[in-house]
Image: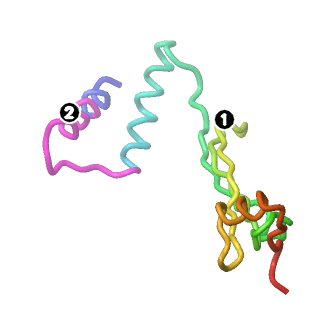
Amino acid sequence: NAVELHRIRGLRNQLAHQSGIYTDWNQLHVDTAIVHAELKHLGFVGDQPLVQSFAERGSPLFDHGLPGVSHLQDYVVGAKVDGEVAAEMKWSLKTYRMGWDEEKVQAALDRGETPPTGLKQ
Protein backbone atom coordinates (compact mmCIF):
# COMPACT_ATOMS: atom_id res chain seq x y z
CA ASN A 1 0.00 0.00 0.00
CA ALA A 2 2.43 2.62 -1.26
CA VAL A 3 0.01 5.57 -0.92
CA GLU A 4 -0.60 4.94 2.80
CA LEU A 5 3.08 4.26 3.51
CA HIS A 6 4.01 7.52 1.79
CA ARG A 7 1.40 9.39 3.88
CA ILE A 8 2.75 7.82 7.08
CA ARG A 9 6.34 8.71 6.12
CA GLY A 10 5.27 12.30 5.48
CA LEU A 11 3.52 12.53 8.86
CA ARG A 12 6.52 10.99 10.60
CA ASN A 13 8.82 13.59 9.03
CA GLN A 14 6.50 16.44 10.00
CA LEU A 15 6.33 15.22 13.60
CA ALA A 16 10.11 14.85 13.74
CA HIS A 17 11.09 18.15 12.14
CA GLN A 18 8.29 20.70 12.56
CA SER A 19 7.04 22.21 15.79
CA GLY A 20 3.31 22.46 16.32
CA ILE A 21 2.49 19.25 14.42
CA TYR A 22 0.49 16.74 16.45
CA THR A 23 -1.22 13.40 16.07
CA ASP A 24 -3.18 11.18 18.44
CA TRP A 25 -2.94 7.64 19.81
CA ASN A 26 -5.66 6.38 17.48
CA GLN A 27 -3.74 7.56 14.41
CA LEU A 28 -0.57 5.93 15.76
CA HIS A 29 -2.45 2.65 16.23
CA VAL A 30 -3.87 2.77 12.68
CA ASP A 31 -0.54 3.71 11.08
CA THR A 32 1.40 1.10 13.07
CA ALA A 33 -1.01 -1.59 11.86
CA ILE A 34 -0.54 -0.48 8.23
CA VAL A 35 3.27 -0.52 8.47
CA HIS A 36 3.26 -3.87 10.26
CA ALA A 37 0.97 -5.41 7.62
CA GLU A 38 3.34 -4.30 4.85
CA LEU A 39 6.40 -5.62 6.70
CA LYS A 40 4.59 -8.93 7.28
CA HIS A 41 3.63 -9.08 3.60
CA LEU A 42 7.33 -8.71 2.71
CA GLY A 43 8.26 -11.47 5.18
CA PHE A 44 10.27 -9.24 7.52
CA VAL A 45 8.07 -9.77 10.60
CA GLY A 46 5.54 -12.24 11.93
CA ASP A 47 2.28 -11.60 13.72
CA GLN A 48 2.24 -8.50 15.90
CA PRO A 49 2.35 -9.48 19.58
CA LEU A 50 -0.27 -8.24 22.01
CA VAL A 51 1.53 -6.14 24.64
CA GLN A 52 -0.39 -5.24 27.80
CA SER A 53 0.70 -3.42 30.93
CA PHE A 54 -0.59 -4.27 34.38
CA ALA A 55 -0.45 -2.89 37.89
CA GLU A 56 -1.67 -4.59 41.03
CA ARG A 57 -1.79 -3.79 44.67
CA GLY A 58 -0.96 -7.17 46.16
CA SER A 59 -1.99 -8.17 49.61
CA PRO A 60 -4.09 -5.70 51.55
CA LEU A 61 -2.45 -3.77 54.34
CA PHE A 62 -1.35 -6.37 56.82
CA ASP A 63 0.43 -6.77 60.13
CA HIS A 64 3.79 -8.18 59.07
CA GLY A 65 5.36 -8.46 62.53
CA LEU A 66 8.39 -6.38 61.52
CA PRO A 67 9.86 -4.29 64.35
CA GLY A 68 8.66 -0.68 64.27
CA VAL A 69 6.45 -1.31 61.19
CA SER A 70 2.71 -0.81 61.61
CA HIS A 71 1.79 -2.41 58.29
CA LEU A 72 3.11 -3.44 54.89
CA GLN A 73 1.57 -3.12 51.39
CA ASP A 74 2.80 -5.08 48.35
CA TYR A 75 2.74 -3.69 44.79
CA VAL A 76 3.57 -5.08 41.35
CA VAL A 77 3.71 -3.52 37.85
CA GLY A 78 4.73 -5.13 34.60
CA ALA A 79 4.13 -5.99 30.98
CA LYS A 80 2.69 -9.09 29.33
CA VAL A 81 3.40 -10.16 25.75
CA ASP A 82 0.70 -12.43 24.33
CA GLY A 83 -0.55 -13.10 27.85
CA GLU A 84 2.83 -14.11 29.30
CA VAL A 85 4.64 -11.91 31.82
CA ALA A 86 7.65 -10.38 30.04
CA ALA A 87 8.74 -7.84 32.66
CA GLU A 88 7.72 -7.35 36.25
CA MET A 89 8.72 -5.14 39.18
CA LYS A 90 7.59 -5.80 42.74
CA TRP A 91 8.05 -3.80 45.91
CA SER A 92 6.65 -3.42 49.39
CA LEU A 93 5.84 -0.19 51.16
CA LYS A 94 6.50 -0.14 54.88
CA THR A 95 4.51 2.20 57.08
CA TYR A 96 6.30 2.76 60.35
CA ARG A 97 4.64 3.29 63.69
CA MET A 98 4.58 6.88 64.91
CA GLY A 99 8.11 7.97 65.83
CA TRP A 100 9.87 5.01 64.19
CA ASP A 101 11.93 4.75 61.01
CA GLU A 102 14.53 2.32 59.61
CA GLU A 103 17.42 3.91 61.58
CA LYS A 104 15.56 3.91 64.90
CA VAL A 105 14.49 0.31 64.42
CA GLN A 106 18.06 -0.79 63.65
CA ALA A 107 19.46 1.18 66.62
CA ALA A 108 16.92 -0.46 68.96
CA LEU A 109 17.77 -3.90 67.59
CA ASP A 110 21.50 -3.18 68.00
CA ARG A 111 20.82 -2.32 71.68
CA GLY A 112 18.98 -5.62 72.09
CA GLU A 113 15.60 -3.92 72.42
CA THR A 114 12.43 -5.07 70.68
CA PRO A 115 10.62 -2.23 68.87
CA PRO A 116 6.82 -2.49 68.77
CA THR A 117 5.34 -4.45 65.87
CA GLY A 118 2.08 -4.51 64.00
CA LEU A 119 -0.97 -2.32 64.06
CA LYS A 120 -1.60 -0.38 67.24
CA GLN A 121 -4.47 -1.92 69.19
Q: Earlier in the sequence, mark 2 or mark 1?
A: 2
Give the percent coordinates (x, y) of residue 66. Answer: 81, 63
The residue most toward the bottom is 121
Residue at the image position 83 percent from the left and 61 percent from the top: 112
Tag 2: amino acid? Asn
Give the percent coordinates (x, y) of residue 4. Answer: 31, 31
Residue at which label 1 appears: 86
Residue at the image position 15 percent from the left and 36 percent from the top: 17
Q: Residue 68 versus residue 61: which sits nearer the camera? A: 68
The answer to whether residue 71 is magenta is no
Main secondary-structure element of the magenta-colored stretch: helix
Tell me the CA gap for discs 2 and 1.
32 Å
**Highlighted magenta segment, given as a residue range:** 8-25
Residue at which label 2 appears: 13
In the shown orientation, is residue 25 left or right of residue 89? left
Looking at the rendered structure, the secondary structure element under dot 2 is helix
The answer to whether residue 22 is magenta is yes
Colour mode of the rendering: rainbow
> Mark 2, mark 1: which one is toward the viewer?
1
Q: Looking at the image, is 1 positioned above or below residue 65?
A: above
Residue at the image position 15 percent from the left and 51 percent from the top: 20
Q: Residue 63 versus residue 90: which sits nearer the camera? A: 63
Marking on residue 109: none
Residue at the image position 46 percent from the left and 35 percent from the top: 33
Q: Are marks 2 and 1 in contact (CB under 8 Å)?
A: no
Q: Would you identify the image quadrant in which residue 34 lies? A: top left
Tag 1: amino acid? Ala
